[in-house]
Image: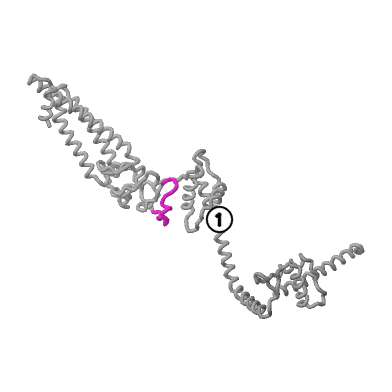
Amino acid sequence: MAEPAEMSPLLSSTITHDTASSNADEATARRRGSIANNIAERCVHSETNAPFTQQQITEAMIERNIALPAQDTPTYDAATQIITQLAASGALSIIQRSKSARASAAKSEENKDETASSTNSSRSSNTSRRTTRQQRTEDMRQRIARHISLHCINQDTNERYSAQYILNEINDLEFNIRLDKSVQQQASYIVSQLMTIIPIIELFEYNFPSVSYRKWSNGRMGRNIFLCGGRIMIGTDITFFLFTVLALLISGTLYFLYIGSALDNTLSAPVVSIVAALLLAAVIGFLSRASMMDPGFIPRGKLAIPTDSDAMVRSDGSKFCDTCLIWRPPRAKHCRYCDSCVQKFDHHCPWLGTCVGQRNYRYFVMFLVSISIYTLYVFITGVMTLVQYAENLAAREGTGWADQFSVTMEQQW
């Protein structure tokens, strides 16, 4: 078995010398530290009367290159010598405290130690609590940024924003992130503020379930009446609708008796009455269609009412209905007569007895157009009847029809 190689004498001496030097440096550092600690206990600042720390005394000794007294000099005496040198050199505005002051300081330090031990636990718990709250706030901020990036687009390019871009905007604008509010509520508020800076818009989905007329009636979702297996939906003011139809029929009957029949005898054919009947049928047909159908009612939901009033409105203009418990889309409104939310609500028409909304709006417009044409037709044919009557009267009297027109108006009206 080969013997281990001997260590080089040069290497051995070098290691021994380095070890002895490091041991001496450690001893000097320990002595300097004990002297600095003694000085810190005995001295204060001459102007502010504030105590010094051991680190401050040590740095001043090293900075002024103050040599330590002999090793056999007691620590108290060595500290006294160095205090004199520090005061003379002007490195520190230092002065020794009296014994009574040192005793009171020592007592206060003991009291501080006792209170520190009692408050350390509370401080550590408060620190951990603050750290946990900061982490939760940062996590909420990142969740809001991800929510906005998923539900918002650029209005100009129709492209989605990255979550990091939104997070940078939130940090730059220093939004107040609250842990007691939901991600959706805070995201909607932040988007409403970002809309003034960047071309951003939030997209919402409104997928309302289809509800059968039985569930609508049993669930008391509105004040409507259903007929013919749910094919006919009657509004709340059915009496006004019937009054409108009755008024049209009575006025139409008077027209056929006095105006239509007179013109038909002149033309030897019931052309005027047929046209008037078709127009009247169109008016009643569009009126009935607009009145007896769903104008765009939204089924009620079971969402929780937002606690904050600011959270009742979202960035796209949609509002929360606290009666129907749903988020109604933009342009939708809750009708207080029908007691339901209506999509693209226009108004509640008393002549229809129901609302005018998304589904029956075109029939309501056709009703307005047809009744306008019908009214204009009745007016023109009525004037023609009066002129014809005036001409017949003028022929009998041997005067012009214009002279007899006022007489005719007085006799007819």
Image x and y of residue 385, in percent: 15, 26
Three-letter amino acid code at the position of disc 1: Glu
| Residue at screen point 32% across, 38% down | 361
**Magenta stretch mostly in which secondary structure?**
loop
Q: Quadrant of the C terminus?
A: top left
Q: Position of residue 182 (x, y in %)?
A: 47, 55
Picture layout, residue 413 above or below residue 161 = above
- Residue at the far left: name it: 397
Q: Nearer the viewer, residue 310 or 6?
A: 310
Residue 166 in the image, given as x and y percentages of width and height: 54, 48
Quadrant into which the N terminus falls: bottom right
- Residue 1 visible in this rendered orientation of the protein: no
193, above or below 21, in the image = above
Tell me the magenta residue range.
302-317
Label 1 packing within 10 angstroms: few (<14), some (14-19), many (20+) = few
All told, the count of numbered labels is 1
Q: Secondary structure at mark 1?
A: helix
What colouring method underlies this structural image? one colour
The quarter holding residue 342 reads top left
Query: Quick check: 280 above or below 143?
Result: above
Q: Which residue is mark 1?
A: 138
Is residue 46 something that shows in the picture? yes
Q: Is residue 276 left or right of residue 394?
A: right
> Is 110 drawn above or below residue 357 in the view shown?
below
Magenta run includes residue 56? no
Of 394 and 320, nearer the camera is 394
Seen in the image, is 352 located left or right of residue 411?
right
- Residue 347 appears in which quarter of the rendering? top left
